[in-house]
Image (cartoon, grey):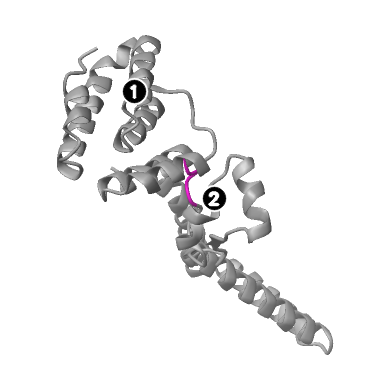
Amino acid sequence: MSSPTSMRHLWPWIWTFLSVAGFTALLIYSPSAREVTRDAVAMLFSIFATPFILETTVAIIGLVVVLTYNQWRLNKEGDGWVYMVTTEDEAGSTTTVQNGQLPKAITQRLQGVILKDKPEPLDESLAIAGVIEGYLELGMPSQALDELHRSPELPDTAASAMLRFRVLGANLATEPALSLLRDASERFPQSRPELVMAAQDIAHWIEKHMQSQMNAYTAWRNEQM
């Protein structure tokens, strides 16, 4: 079945075809219509063929043709406008962080990127969390802690609390991390299963990257809240 949009675009062509067909039939079967049409065409030709009117008519027709073609091209290919991802300079990067936007360190890799379609709004907290998670996955806890300290204030959610105590735990700040874990468990009781899993993830992380720190591993392994 045809969609309403396609039918709406089709109706002008249908009416045009019916009008042309009706006018053609009138010319074929009516001698008076042929005579009137011939006289009208001759009169119009004599008018538009006169000096100055001819040049003006040709210019107007040419302008209409150009505008029509340009509108057709815009509808088919778009207007050509694009979105460019840029970064602030060093002087403006501090202001950017203070305003809660992404710092230059995160957006630097996007500098000069050209997008044809408007990009969707970016969740800054998710982007920052992704950078910190990346440092933890690479076994770089000190860089993750530095990034956490440089980042704007994260939202007060269970996910943000998990990220904070994971970074502290990876940097062997076990007691502050466990305290933050227990506080998050009290404030977000619906997220306790995820918090327990995060504690076990820290234990596995310490076992993988810091095998000599078995005391910290045991503390996180035994944390069941």
- In the image, the segment drawn in magenta is 119-123
- Left or right, 153 with respect to 204, comes to right
Residue 66 sits above or below residue 108 on the image: below
Q: Position of residue 70 (x, y in %)?
A: 58, 71
Q: Which of the 4 quarters of the picture holds residue 97?
A: top right
The stretch drawn in magenta includes residue 97: no
Tell me which amino acid carries mark 2. Pro
Task: Name the residue: 70% across, 81% down.
Answer: 42
Confirm whether residue 15 shows in the render.
no
- CA neighbours of label 2 inside 10 A, class few (<14), some (14 to 19), many (20+): many
| Residue 103 sits above or below residue 180 on the image | below
The label number, if any, that marks residue 175 in the structure image: 1
On the image, the x and y values in percent for residue 173 come to 35, 31
Between 213 and 15, the one lying in front of the other is: 213
Query: Which of the pair 170/16 is nearer the observer?
Result: 170
Q: Residues within 10 Å of mark 1 (few under 14, many from 20)?
A: some
Give the secondary structure at mark 2: loop
Residue 112 seen by the camera: yes
Question: To which residue does mark 2 refer?
Answer: 103
Q: Is residue 118 above or below residue 214?
A: below
